[in-house]
Image (spheres, helix red, strand yellow):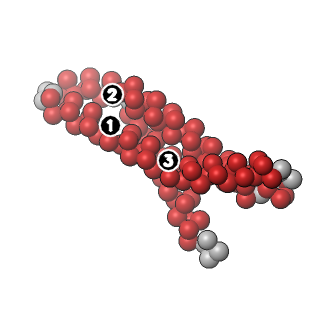
Amino acid sequence: MEKYIKSFSKALVILTVIFFLSFFGGANAEKIGMPNFIFQVCVISANALMFVIPLVYVVIFGIGMTTLFRKVLNNTTRAVVKKVEEKFPILWFIVSFVCFILYFMFVNVIFALPGA
């Protein structure tokens, strides 16, 4: 399960970067002289990622919480819990959480704009 958290978290980081690049690329298409085909690809990918990113985060969160609770409930001593913390990819779990928060804040700001 831990390897799935790492792989999904890496995918979430990549998807978040692609989302921001495609959104800002599409928003500034006229300024940078972007061809129409590339503009359409940016718009389609930004719209698709707007729905894919939350789903990937829910999968990461579900796998992470299930794994963490299962290991903590199975192991009652403090020494064993410390070993569980070493095996659990907490850094990738935090990175995925930060990426999702950035995405969520950005999407809320976009939907709050008067022209949206």
Q: Earlier in the sequence, mark 3 or mark 2?
A: 2
Residue drawn at (21%, 30%) of the image: 71
Task: Decide if residue 73 is in sight here.
Answer: yes
- Which residue lies under the disc numbered 3? 53
- Which residue lies under the disc numbered 1? 63
Residue drawn at (44%, 43%) of the image: 56
Q: Position of residue 10 (x, y in %)?
A: 51, 33
Which corner quadrant of the image does residue 14 belong to?
A: top right
Tell me if 71 is positioned left or right of 13 in this view. left
Towards the viewer: 55 or 24: 55
Quarter of the picture containing the N terminus is top left
Tell me if 114 is positioned left or right of 86 in this view. right
Contact flag, marks 2 and 1 (Cβ < 8 Å): yes
Residue sticking out furthest to the left: 76
- Which residue lies under the disc numbered 2? 1
Task: Decide if residue 91 is in sight here.
Answer: no
Tell me if 108 is positioned left or right of 85 in this view. right
Q: Position of residue 16 (x, y in %)?
A: 57, 45
